[in-house]
Image (tube, rainbow, N blue to C red):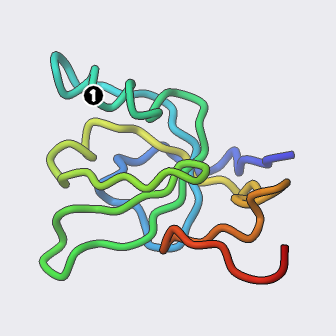
Amino acid sequence: MIMQDPHREPIPLSEAEVGSCYRVLSVNATGVIRQRMLDMGLVPGVCLTVLRFAPLGDPIEIRINRFFMSLRREEARFVQVLPVAICPRPHHGRFRRFFRGGFFHGGR
């Protein structure tokens, strides 16, 4: 169960902290950019983790389930997120040994 702190205010994704988990409240972009975000899974209600910012602060890398996505800071400011207290487990089931490099490790 994901608990939300009722005293937290929604913030733009561009102001999110690295390593924190958030729930998407809304995607306020328009046109092609909005459609691109929605097509790639950045939809209201989904939980995401902010992984890192590029050295100059742009782009932002996030993880939605097992999908890694990079957004420009300008695009990320259109996404309103709310911090969540507990992140859902990103790896479960038969893919628990999968890591970002794209290779499986360990036994069969």
Horizontal relation, residue 20 to residue 57: left or right: right
Residue on which the image places disc 1: 36
Name the image quarter holding residue 40. Answer: top left
Residue 14 appears in the picture as rendered: yes
Name the image quarter holding residue 34. Answer: top left
Name the spot of residue 71 as percent of width and height, x first. Answer: 25, 51
> Foreground: 94 or 28?
94
Q: Is residue 96 above or below residue 8?
A: below
Name the spot of residue 61 as percent of width and height, x first. Answer: 35, 62
Name the spot of residue 83 as percent of width and height, x first. Answer: 58, 53
Determine the secondary structure under disc 1.
helix
Residue occupying the point 71% across, 51% down: 5
Residue occupying the point 74% across, 58% down: 95
Farthest residue, direction front: 108
Quadrant into which the C terminus falls: bottom right
Residue occupying the point 48% across, 28% down: 43
Name the spot of residue 31 as percent of width and height, x first. Answer: 16, 16
Residue occupying the point 18% across, 82% down: 55
Amino acid type, mark 1:
Arg
Pointer 1 local density, CA inside 10 Å: few below 14, some 14–19, many at least 20: few
Q: Is residue 74 above or below residue 95?
A: above
Name the image quarter holding residue 18. Answer: bottom left
